[in-house]
Amino acid sequence: MPVEIGKVVDGTVTGITNFGAFIQLPDGITGLCHISEIADEYVKDVKDYLKEQQRVKVKVIEVSGNGKVSLSIRKATEGSKQKNTVKKEAVKEFVSRSVRPKASFEDMLARFLKDSDEKLKDMKKNVNKRKGNGYNRK
C-alpha cells in the first residue's frame, strides 16, 4: 500500500537523532519526523519527547521524488487534546527533584543580604587591587 500525503497512521520510533526521529510505518517504509514536527513547543532534545520502540501517531506531510517520507507528530495530534506522556513524566521528575522546602521570608532576606554583602566585598577588593597596580588610566 503506497504512502498517501495527509494520511494519519500509527508508527514505531526506530531511531532518534539530534535532528529528529526515524519512524517505521505499518507497510515497512521508514520516514523522518523532523525535530520541528515533534511538538508544538520548542524541542531542544528529541529524547525528552520520544523513546525508541514507542508507538506514535504520525501524519504523512511529504513524499519526495526519491522516496523520502516526511512525517509530523505535531500535525497528527492537531485539534486533539492528546499530549505526549513522555514529556509529562520528564517534567514531573524535574519538578520533584528541584522542589525545596519553603523558607520563611526572614530566612530568605537574611540569605540575600549575606550574599549581597559578600559580592560587594569582592567587588571592592577587585577595585582596590586595580587602583594599586596602575590600571587606573586617565
Image (cartoon, rainbow, N blue to C red):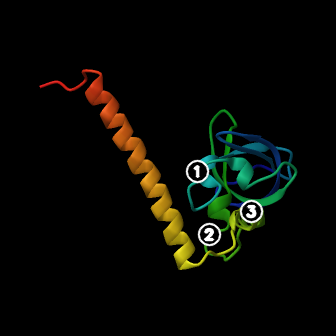
**Residue sitting farthest toward the top:** 134
Looking at the picture, tell me which residue is in the foreground, 123 or 24.
123
- Give the CA distance from mark 3 to mark 1: 28 Å
Placement of the C terminus among the 4 image quadrants: top left
Q: Earlier in the sequence, mark 1 or mark 2?
A: 1
Identify the disc placed on residue 97. 3
- Give the CA distance from mark 1 to mark 2: 14 Å
Q: Amino acid at mark 3?
A: Arg
Q: Amino acid at mark 1?
A: Ser
Determine whether 115 is above or below 107 in the image.
above
Q: Which residue is located at x 38 percent, y 38 percent? A: 125
Identify the disc placed on residue 78. 2
Query: Viewer-nearest of labels 1 and 2?
Result: 1
Query: Looking at the picture, how far across and down is residue 78, in whole percent?
Result: 62, 69
Q: Residues within 10 Å of mark 3 (few under 14, many from 20)?
A: few
Q: Relative to residue 90, is residue 127 drawn left or right?
A: left
Q: Amino acid at mark 2?
A: Glu
The local secondary structure at tag 2 comes to loop
Query: Looking at the picture, how far across and down is residue 20, in whole percent?
Result: 67, 44
- Give the CA distance from mark 3 to mark 2: 32 Å
Q: Which residue is located at x 70 percent, y 37 percent? A: 67
Q: Relative to residue 22, is residue 111 drawn left or right?
A: left
Q: Residues within 10 Å of mark 1 (few under 14, many from 20)?
A: some
The local secondary structure at tag 3 comes to helix
Q: Which residue is mark 1?
A: 36
Q: Earlier in the sequence, mark 3 or mark 2?
A: 2
